[in-house]
Image (spheres, helix red, strand yellow):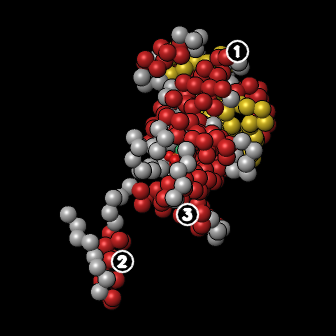
Amino acid sequence: MKLGMIGLGKMGHNLVMNLLRHNHEVAAYDMNSDAVSKVAEHGAIPASSLEQLVAALETPRIIWIMVPAGAALHSVITSLTPLLSEGDIVIDGGNSHYKNSVQLADELAKSGIHFFDIGTSGGIEGAEQGGCFMIGGDEAVFRSIEPIFKDIAVENGYMYTGKPGSGHFLKMVHNGIEYGMMQAIAEGFEVLDKSQYEYSYEDVARVWSNGSVIRSWLMELMQDAFAKDPKLESIRGVMQSSGEGRWTVETALELQASAPVIAMSLFMRYRSLEDDTFHGKVVAALRNGFGGHAVESSK
Ligand SMILES: O=C(O)[C@H](O)[C@@H](O)[C@H](O)[C@H](O)COP(=O)(O)O
């Protein structure tokens, strides 16, 4: 099939490579012209503006947007929509909040444009070698673009999830699970690290990756990381987050669903951003107040 790709960062670039490998025709645009040249070297049709990208496609056009959720996506949509016609298809493959995707689908539907919210998983490697795609939008229109996903997903690695918003909702929950799984793995290694035993963590991750109940891609990645740096000494224990974990917790609260592990994982990320905490000072002051327990003075 022929489609356009807007956003050629790590994910967009690799998706283009995957599409080209499967003989799809891709017109590609990014604000960074070097990123466009890189995919053009591999056979993509280079576009130096959104207008050029739109002109390179036949109607109904299929345009996949792979830019950061929020302001960047909003800006692309605002500039792109006036260039499109009824029947065109717009895909957001980023980690957008599902409520924004529902709203966007409604807005684009007013101009007869079909919108798909796609949760894309599998990381940078998956984008290139075969990823996992959770696809929300109109089912009949989805069937017309399904061949794309048959090609670029791993086997059984795509799913039509239902009405608009359902793709990004599913990806949000997936990422909430990701937070909990990673935190549990991390805590296990923390206990090992504080223990009297001298394990090679690379070997632990290897043995847990083979036949054990907790074998997983995350454990394999753990093995790779410990192979490079046996005690992860070159990395600070600071855990950033992009929003999906928080949205999962907020959604669980809205739905009154119990998600304590995911919530704690999120809070552990926030905690990791601070060396000292105000809550720690408060508890120390209280213990000192009622029990005369010693406090440590700050520098
Ligand atoms: O499934 C995936 O491929 C990942 O989840 C991917 O989407 C990304 O790496 C996360 O969004 C990171 O999320 P945090 O920055 O919140 O950890």
Q: Is residue 282 left or right of residue 48?
A: left
Q: Give the residue number, with chain letter if any, for mark 1.
A: 23
Label 2 amino acid?
Answer: Val
Q: Residue furthest left?
A: 299
Label 3 amino acid?
Answer: Ala
In the rendered image, the vertical position of residue 72 relative to residue 271, given as above or below: above
Which of the 4 image quarters holds residue 152?
top right
Q: Give the residue number, with chain letter if any, for mark 2.
A: 283
Q: Nearer the viewer, residue 206 or 280?
A: 206
Q: Nearer the viewer, residue 271 or 109?
A: 271
- Separation of marks 3 and 1 at Cα, in angstroms: 43 Å
Tell me what residue is drawn at x 49 percent, y 41 percent: 230
Nearer the camera: disc 1 or disc 2: 2
Which of the 4 image quarters holds residue 218?
top right
On the rendered image, what quadrant is the N terminus found in? top right
Q: Is residue 281 left or right of residue 146?
A: left
